[in-house]
Image (cartoon, coloured by chain):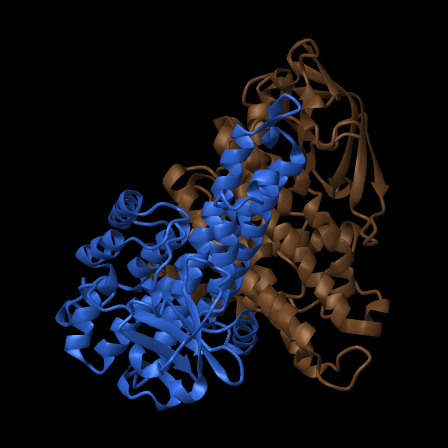
Chain colours: A blue, B brown
Amino acid sequence: MDLLPTAEQDEIVATVRSVLANHHTLGEPLNDSLWQAAADQGWFGLGLDESMGGVGYSIVEEALLFTELGRAAVPGPFLATVIAAHVAASEPNAATVAALVRGSDRAAMAEPFDAERTSVLDGPGSTWSLINDDDGLRLVATDDLGPADATDALDTLTPLALVDQRATASAPVVVSATDPEPLRLRATLLVAAMAAGMAEATAAQSVAYALDREQFGQPIGTFQAVKHRCTDMATRAEVAVCQVRYASLALRDGLAEAPFHIHAARVVAVRSAVENAEVNVQNHGGIGFTWEHTAHRYVTRARLLANQFGTPNGHLADMLSATAPA
Amino acid sequence: MDLDFTPQEQVFRDEARTWLAEHLPTEERPPEGAEMRAFDLAWQRTLFDSGWAGINWPTEYGGRGLTDIEQMIWYEEFARAEPPFTLNNSCTFVGNNHGGPTLIACGTDEQKSEHLPKILRGETVWCQGFSEPGSGSDLASLSCKAIIDGDELVVTGQKIWTSYAHVADQQELLVRTDPTAPKHKGISWVICDMTTPGIDIRPIVTMSHVTDFCEVFYDEVRIPLTNVVGQVNDGWRVSMTTLSFERGTAFMADQVELAAVVERLIEEARHRPVPGGRRRAIDDDEFARRLATIRAEVTALRAMTITGISRIRRSGMPGPEGSMIRLFHGELHQRVYRLALDLLGPGAMRRTGIDGDDTWTGAYLQSFAYTIGGGTSDIQRNIVGERLLGLPRGR
């Protein structure tokens, strides 16, 4: 029993960080060079079997990757593309898997928006759309969704469109997950992993600012009001990171209580990401309220993330109905 | 990273479960006084006789020499067995969780062989003498003075918030041995025999009606210099060791028990109507969400506890991350009982004890101690902010 990353896992994290540092600037749109670098690094098939063209790591390493993507607040359809590759691999549809893994195809994320409409995130440039609704988890061609009604997105780096649900229901299915639940759990955990990374990033941003910014002749981190908010942020991030790690191991090992731990991870991590993002703006004062500063990026991304692969309320209900570990 | 228990750990768990099923006391723990002490010590002795005391203590002092993981497994099995009392309330808590571990880390061979076996065998009760009326959060300002006279310390002053002083044999006592030195440099950590002449113990009744809280007065109490743990005037460092155990591993039992408390609360919500209504409480959106949130949090607390154990295994000692766990745990413990009282509705008007079958309101009142004892939440936040995050000192 050990919940600290191994040396090999630390190495994976360090590599991911250096790739992100070279190809991504916080607050900038998705860079094609990053997408290609991600494909070259095997990120889109990190947790896929080598027989399917993947790297052959487990959900544990995939979760470490997504924690870093969350930390850097990278926009772009990483989650939908990775899950789409898993969906395609489950059929299996080798050609689609290969196109997704090598980065030439991307997958947008499509989920119910309200009673009549489906939201599509990152539609432009995505060959496929990954639809997650009551009818299952499946890939359709984005072009088959018909005319999209582009809408201003809260997260300005993630294009949002609304399409009629009749279009999502009638679009020809390219690949469909025969058993969607395990992949939904995987995606739920990866959402939690991203959220945990975001919670850590905002805690770090606040601590750095509290050390740097001086008022009344001293760094504002000297004052308990600020220091204690930073501490609470770091604690919320730690809570999220620990539970995400535990849940990823439980899923990797196929434990019966894995769903329970994944729902717990999702609940605590998404809440940590949202709360930390909000407090981070407050800690930065006036500059934090500006467009120029990056604090708002975490606010809008956390709100976006909270509504992917389910909603906060839906996951609370799942948490309460999950079977507790024996 | 792995969730695997070794074959040895699995055998340990099976043995603990079997043993607890046969040996767990069924009678209620007496609420106070000599009967309570006798009950707690008898349980400690029973544990020792069967090899369940000092699980993570060295074998040379009567411990099992196992790891914190086995200690946690024991707590998990204890909680699963639905005991009629909680380990956190036992008068053996200080001996097992800070006095003992501090001696293991900083004591002399004589001190260890004198005291550790007695703690494990259930022969002595330890209490803590850290806080004073004028020194709470600012512990290092303590003024209970000790003058060196030959081979003895002569202690005069007062301590406060000392649980179980009235039934204790020994005390971990912080005294000022050098009033001229900077405040952190003139403190000593000494073992005080509570039967020494000159000690006056007075009870303080708590808001939870517990009567084992005390203040202790010292009037020229003579303590052998050989009872100093660490060096004279090096007591601050020793006390930080004590507190790192308190913040690191001492509350593992409570952290584990809390998960069982939350499951009981969810069971209550399945069977009780929502206060003022007819539906089951669990079908009420607000209660359902609060229960789900707290269930997720207590699950994450276990992951944090295991992460803490993993860190201790690598570094040897609990680090400042322990304050993060302690902070989260203390506030979560309170949220659990706050939710319980909201869920009880008019049932919250009834007073219960803190041990036994029905403990909701008693434990609610007791829960206020969880963000005060062992350093208030504000102090824990300072520790995390300054030692872990590197923020500047200052108040």
Residue B372 falls left or right of residue B263: right
For the point 55% across and 25% down, which residue is it? B237
Residue B335 falls left or right of residue B132: left
Q: Quadrant of the N terminus of chain B?
A: bottom left
Q: Quadrant of residue B282?
A: bottom right
Q: Percent from the top left, x then y, of residue B113?
A: 51, 33
Above or below residue B236? Residue A124 is below
For the point 78% across and 61% down, which residue is it? B362
For the point 83% across and 51% down, which residue is it? B207
Q: Is residue B42 visible to the viewer in this orientation of the structure? A: no
Q: Is residue A143 visible to the viewer in this orientation of the structure? A: yes
Q: Percent from the top left, x then y, of residue A325?
A: 47, 72
Q: Quadrant of the C terminus of chain B?
A: top right
- How many dots with numbers? 0
Pick the front one: A124 or A283: A124
Above or below residue A128? Residue B219 is above
Q: Quadrant of residue A164?
A: bottom left
Residue B288 falls left or right of residue B387: right
Q: Percent from the top left, x then y, of residue A118?
A: 45, 79
Q: Percent from the top left, x then y, of residue B97?
A: 57, 43
